[in-house]
Every structure is written in structure tokens, then in C-alpha cells.
């Protein structure tokens, strides 16, 4: 018998000072049985911190190989922002960059491993892909506080992310970086 998805209901107060976005979000998110807590939290934080009109989670969830986990479409239905989560292949990032004008990667995977994969083959507009790294220890702290029905406060300001759940605040640095290697190309 196959395991079913676990539903999470989250009421989120979003204050993204860096982008000037202040919203109250009411999210219902399905966690696939194979999805780790770190991946789930990264996916939710990517959605919140890239929030704009037209943002949505993939309908196929983790099983969709064609759609990004999170994406934005404009009012005419055109894909405008592809948000990848985790550790995508170089081929997937190449496809994303060819299909969409804005691509960002939200991950908790070690930077050197992400850069090694990105260097494994050419990726269209690699230098334009923004990478946001969330420390695994930060995500593990959040996982300990997370309930299937909970309220969160998210604040991003001055390169830091603060998440408050049930009166406990966890924080981490959150500055965009790149998948380009620090090594000069020859």
C-alpha cells in the first residue's frame, strides 16, 4: 500500500524588507512521503521569499519532472520565474534557463557539490541563476518547531532571515550567491 502525502496548513506573516513585500499567506502544502523535512522547508521558504502575484507550487509536486517545484506565471500565463529546489542536475538547470527569463535555486546542499554539478556541462545563462543557500542546521531547528498546523513569522532584512514559530526565533544569513566556481575559467 502506497503512503499518502502529509498535509501542512501554515499561516505565514511575511515581512521581506529587502524586497518591500509584506503579506499574510495561508498555505496548504503537501509533503510527499519521500520528501525530506529539509526539502519541504526549503520549498516553503523559497515560495515565501520569492512571493509575488502568480506564484504557485507545482501541481505534480515532487513527481513532476517537467515543472519546477515553485514557479511564477504572469496574468497571461507566461512562465516568468522558475524556482528550483534542492540539488538539480546541470541538465535541469539548463532547461530552466532556456525556458524562463528568471531562474533561482534554493538549496540546503553544500555549495561545492552544487558548483561541481553546475560545472559538469554547459548551462544557459549560468551567471544569471541566483542561488540561495539555507544552512541544514537552520532547517533542522525549524523542523523541530514545525507542526502540521502552525503559524510562522518570516522576516528578511539586511541579509538575514528570521523565522519565528511558537515564540521561538531561528535565524540564518541569506544572501544570494552564484553557481559559478570561484576558480577562474580557462
Image (cartoon, rainbow, N blue to C red):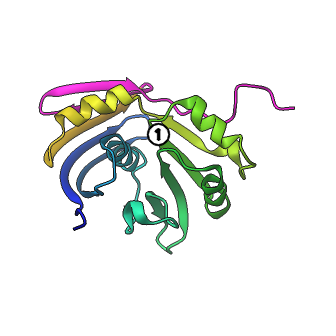
Above-or-below relation of 169 to 96: above
The percent position of residue 185, horizontal first and vertical second, equals 82, 32
The quadrant of the picture occupied by the C terminus is top right
Residue at the location (49% across, 60% down)? 68
148 and 24: which is toward the camera: 148
Above-or-below relation of 96 to 126: below
13 and 118: which is toward the camera: 118
The percent position of residue 88, horizontal first and vertical second, equals 55, 49
Q: Residue furthest front?
A: 1
Report if residue 153 lies within the magenta region. no
Residue at the location (41% across, 54% down)? 52
Report if residue 181 lies within the magenta region. yes
The percent position of residue 55, horizontal first and vertical second, equals 40, 60
Q: How crowded is the residue under tag 1: few (<14 C-alpha within 10 Å), some, or many (20+)?
A: many
Part of the protein shown in magenta: 158-186
**Residue on which the image places disc 1:** 107
Left or right: residue 184 compared with residue 26? right
Q: Judge whether residue 134 can be spotted in this image.
A: yes
Above-or-below relation of 71 to 171: below
The percent position of residue 140, horizontal first and vertical second, equals 29, 31
185 and 154: which is toward the camera: 185
Residue at the location (25% across, 66% down)? 2
Residue at the location (54% across, 47% down)? 104
Amino acid at each position: 500500500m502506497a503512503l499518502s502525502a502529509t498535509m501542512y496548513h501554515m499561516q505565514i506573516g511575511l515581512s521581506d524588507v529587502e524586497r518591500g513585500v509584506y503579506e499574510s499567506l495561508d498555505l496548504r502544502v503537501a509533503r510527499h512521503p519521500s520528501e525530506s523535512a529539509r526539502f519541504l522547508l526549503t520549498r516553503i521558504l523559497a515560495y515565501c521569499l520569492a512571493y509575488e502575484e502568480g506564484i504557485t507550487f507545482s501541481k505534480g509536486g515532487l513527481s513532476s519532472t517537467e515543472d519546477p517545484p515553485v514557479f511564477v506565471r504572469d496574468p497571461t500565463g507566461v512562465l516568468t520565474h522558475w524556482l528550483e529546489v534542492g540539488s538539480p542536475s546541470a541538465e535541469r538547470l539548463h532547461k530552466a534557463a532556456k525556458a524562463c527569463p528568471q531562474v533561482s535555486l534554493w538549496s540546503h546542499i553544500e555549495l561545492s557539490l552544487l558548483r561541481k554539478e553546475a560545472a559538469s556541462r554547459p548551462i544557459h545563462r549560468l551567471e544569471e541563476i541566483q542561488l540561495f543557500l539555507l544552512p541544514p542546521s537552520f532547517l533542522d531547528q525549524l523542523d523541530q518547531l514545525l507542526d502540521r498546523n502552525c503559524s510562522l513569522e518570516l522576516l528578511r532584512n539586511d541579509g538575514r532571515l528570521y523565522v519565528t514559530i511558537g515564540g521561538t526565533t531561528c535565524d540564518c544569513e541569506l544572501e544570494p550567491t552564484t553557481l559559478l566556481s570561484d576558480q577562474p575559467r580557462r
